[in-house]
Amino acid sequence: MTKYYHDYFWKEGIPYGIEPLQDWQNSALSYKIVMDPYRKRISIEKYVYGSFITTIYDSNFINFRYLNQIDQPSWQKITVNETPESSHCLIRDQDDRIVFIETYFFQGNYCTKCIAKSPQGFLLSTQLIHYKILGETENKVVLFDANGHPVLQKYYEADPINGEFTHLIKELKDMQGVTFGQN
């Protein structure tokens, strides 16, 4: 049986529902998490008062479970447009197929945001990159789904002179109870 939820959170790249709704048709906002029994394909649908609004996640486009694969697939990044404030790139897989369109936003020499879209233009994710050298409290990267829910956080040590990340300190993959907005 399909369940509708008041909200959801991410853990290890898989969405989990919060507060199942019995009367979802009369709920101002609800989410339906759809997955096959083997979790090969997962999606999240958003509803307002029982009416479908959008699919906010589909693992056929981007699969958050595979962000930490040991054997990463090959990627090629091709810059198609660049300004001092942003860079627009195509990401191709090992078969030369465009799999993402990414837009990077910069503050000086530092990338502070990356928006990933499908080749069809659907928003897939947003990454916010925080730097102590720019006045943030921590050096970290936060990945959000298309609905603004955090998927994972990575904390880094940085070079004290140039502020570039040097190595990973810790990674949080359980976002239950984590709430903060995107800039």
Image (cartoon, rainbow, N blue to C red):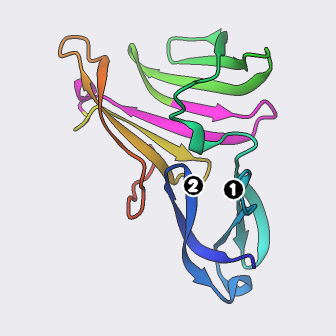
17 w.r.t. 169: above or below: below
Give how far across and how far down residue 151 sits, in percent. Answer: 49, 48
The residue that appears at 82% across and 34% down in the rendered structure is 120
Measure the C-alpha gap from mark 1 to mark 2: 9 Å
Query: Does the magenta-highlighted stretch encompass residue 40?
Result: no
What's the amino acid at mark 1?
A: Arg
150 w.r.t. 2: above or below: above
Numbered circle sitting on residue 14: 2
Q: Looking at the image, do the residues carrying marks 1 and 2 touch, with CB atoms under 8 Å apart?
A: yes
Question: Quadrant of residue 15 in the image?
Answer: bottom right
Q: Residue furthest bottom?
A: 23
Which callout, 1 or 2, points at the residue further toward the start of the chain? 2
Residue placed most toward the observer, 172 or 39: 39
The residue that appears at 62% across and 48% down in the rendered structure is 146
What's the amino acid at mark 2?
A: Ile
Give how far across and how far down residue 25 sits, in percent. Answer: 74, 84
Give how far across and how far down residue 164 sits, in percent. Answer: 31, 16
Boundaries of the magenta span = 114-135
According to the picture, the residue beneath numbered tag 1 turns out to be 39
108 w.r.t. 144: above or below: above
Foreground mark, 1 or 2, reads 1
Q: From the viewer's perspective, is 126 left or right of 54? A: left
Residue placed most toward the observer, 91 or 94: 94
Give how far across and how far down residue 107 sits, in percent. Answer: 40, 21
Question: Quadrant of residue 36 in the image?
Answer: bottom right
The residue that appears at 50% across and 18% down in the rendered structure is 85
Determine whether the residue tagged by mark 2 lies in a helix, strand or loop: strand
